[in-house]
Amino acid sequence: MSYSTENIKNVSIAGHGQTGKTSLFEHLLFAGGAISRAETIESGKTVSDYSPEEIERKISIHAASAHLERKGKKINFFDTPGSSDFTGDVILSFRASEFALLAVDGRSGVQIETIKLWRNLDGRNKPRGIFVTKMDEERTDFGKALADVREKFRIDAVPFTLPMGSGADYRGVIDVLNGKAWFAQTDAPEKEGEIPPEYQAAAAQALERLIEAAAEGDDTLMEHYIDKGSLSPEEMHKGLIEALSENKIVPAFGGSALRNSGLVPFLDFAADIAPDPGTARDSGKNTEGKEVDVPVDPGKPLSALVIKTSYDQFSGKLSWVKIISGKLSADSEAFNVSENKKERIGKLYICQGKKLEEVKELFAGDMGIVAKSATFRTNDTVTAGDNSLQFVPLRLPDPVHAVAVNALAKKDDDKLGEFLVRAAEEDRTFRYSFNAETKEAVISGMGELQINIILDKIKANQKIEMETHVPRVAYRETITKKAGAEYTHKKQTGGHGQYGKVVLEIAPLPRGEKYHFVNAIFGGAIPKNYIPGVEKGIAEGMAAGTMAGYPVVDVEVKITDGKYHPVDSSELSFKLAARNAFREAMRQSGPTLLEPVMNLTVFVEEKYLGDVMSDLSGKRGKILGQDSVGGIAEIRAQVPQSELLRYSIDLRSITSGTGSFSVEFDHYAPVTGKLADEIVKAAEAFKVQETEE
């Protein structure tokens, strides 16, 4: 069955690890009638955690999707991983959804990953809500959790449900909007009933807050509220929809997934109040490359974005597609704008976890799967015909952890590379490349866990034995003072010889200027047709410096004089002369090493702040600043890349696995003294090793 845009709701369930997201997802499907029984994570049979890696580790690794019908609406749910190692699948789920439900543990309150996700949602201006989980467990406190939300995010969440008790005294929830109670049952769906007398005052107060929130959604409603002191149910419904779609309010819910409690009120909210895709906008680039808003519109021709690529052992390549406008039909033809190729759409599916359900068409706002696409890749734009509009790619974070990898058996290197490329296609936060400079195959990702899972999967499925090590750092060389040199390349072997003389000067440039070539030849000392050869020779000289063989940067090279032979000179002669002249000049110019310096942002609980700061100082880090909100500290620093090669492991150790960080390249900075000597020695040892191999 296909659903029109106004009858579709897309909800991402996200949050810190161990907050109960998968259990919430599973029991929402059960409460909505999509599955006949809710399974436990321990059973390995949940709808969303179905891969062997997830079943073994009992954590979510991939985003999973499933759907149910409620009040004539199709609600697509995404269950997302809680570990920062798999944040890419959270981001693609946010892109495909109009509403995010953040799970907050009723005992722990707001944790680090939730803060990072909230900031990501802020950047999208995405409507969101809070679900306080595990209300039947000891030490849970709904009010305290919402107070923590207020402190950390500077917002007052609006309760749509109120828990009746907590821990051993937990009885269920009050549906504030609809004025009823839902009582938790033992091993049975929650049961509707009247609000107990002792909770009626709290329910009335919460309803008043809901009416105020609804009035915030519309100026006319605010006038009615001021004049009459209240709103009709119809006005309230309209106002809440508008306020939420414009991200003016944050609804809050509470419950216990394992006791099937608090789920029905949320499903009713999702069907009645949560934004539908028609309220949303996506981001595209027009013919001028300018970013523009693209409305989700069923009345326009087909446009869609490929948000994820996965491979199934039975179904092959699966392309997850979010429909932005028009509709996508099975057995039709579309145009892949990103690849500039036509694509034949064969079978079309929606999914219930790993189970695929075939459909004939999908309308704007919906999400489905195209099987065995010839051209589709993640971030590709799909349209009805040749169209210059392209959707903005997923805004994914840069990798923070890297290792060099190679197969133990040389014959397996190509095969290993093939499956690493496939892994990088499935998870765009994982990257694989061959670094020609360091002569290493390097893989990078969001953390050690992500990389280990990918390598373990390849090892188990493909029987490839491999080894990993810390990758070499891509240092640079530069100069500190002016110098000059000349070199004459002269060779006579019978017949035409080789002759070229080059005189040059080199001078340091400001950091980041890279290279500047000046031709100061007068009087035809070097004919113009040989100047390209001179430039090629300089480029070869700069490709490997004289200290440790690293590329040379931030140098101006001026050719001042030279000499040629009318018969024996050639472009090759001048290339060789220029290369050697540059190397000779560099030896005299005070060469020095440069190391890459990274911008580092670390998120930790305040109790670990001192240990983290001390560790960064020991890593030659420069602290730029810090902020602290609600017990979570954000530290901004600049640290040499060589000190961060194992930082994901170090930080996990310091913070008992709770800290997280992001990192990006900023600049190159000089490195001298004993450290520079060690770098040079290591480079020389690497050259010897290469020669022996």
Image: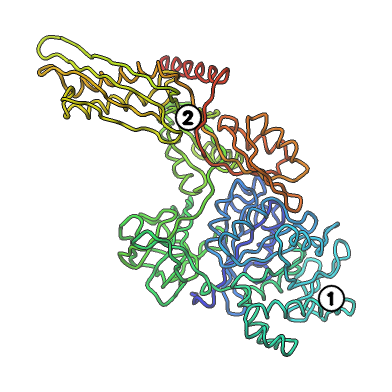
Residue 474 is labelled as 2
Estimate the x, y position of residue 111 in percent, counting from the top left: 72, 52
Q: Is residue 465 visible?
A: no
- Left or right of 120 in this view: 385: left
Identify the disc placed on residue 202.
1
Furthest-front residue in this view: 522
Amino acid at pointer 2:
Ala
Q: Where is residue 151 drawn, in percent x and y?
A: 75, 59
**Is residue 245 shown to the viewer in this render?**
yes
Label 1, label 2: how many angstroms apart (C-alpha)? 62 Å
Is residue 432 found left or right of 541 in the rendered image?
Answer: right
Q: Which corner quadrant of the image does residue 304 belong to?
A: bottom left
333 relative to 128 in the view: left or right: left
Up/down of 575 relative to 194, above or below: above
Figure quadrant of the C terminus: top left
Choose between 643 and 519: the one closer to the eye.
519
| Rendering colour mode | rainbow
Q: Is residue 475 above or below residue 121?
A: above
Question: Up-down: is 35 above or below 599?
Answer: below
Amino acid type at circle 1 is Ala
Q: In the structure shown, which secondary structural element does the residue marked by tag 2 occupy?
A: loop
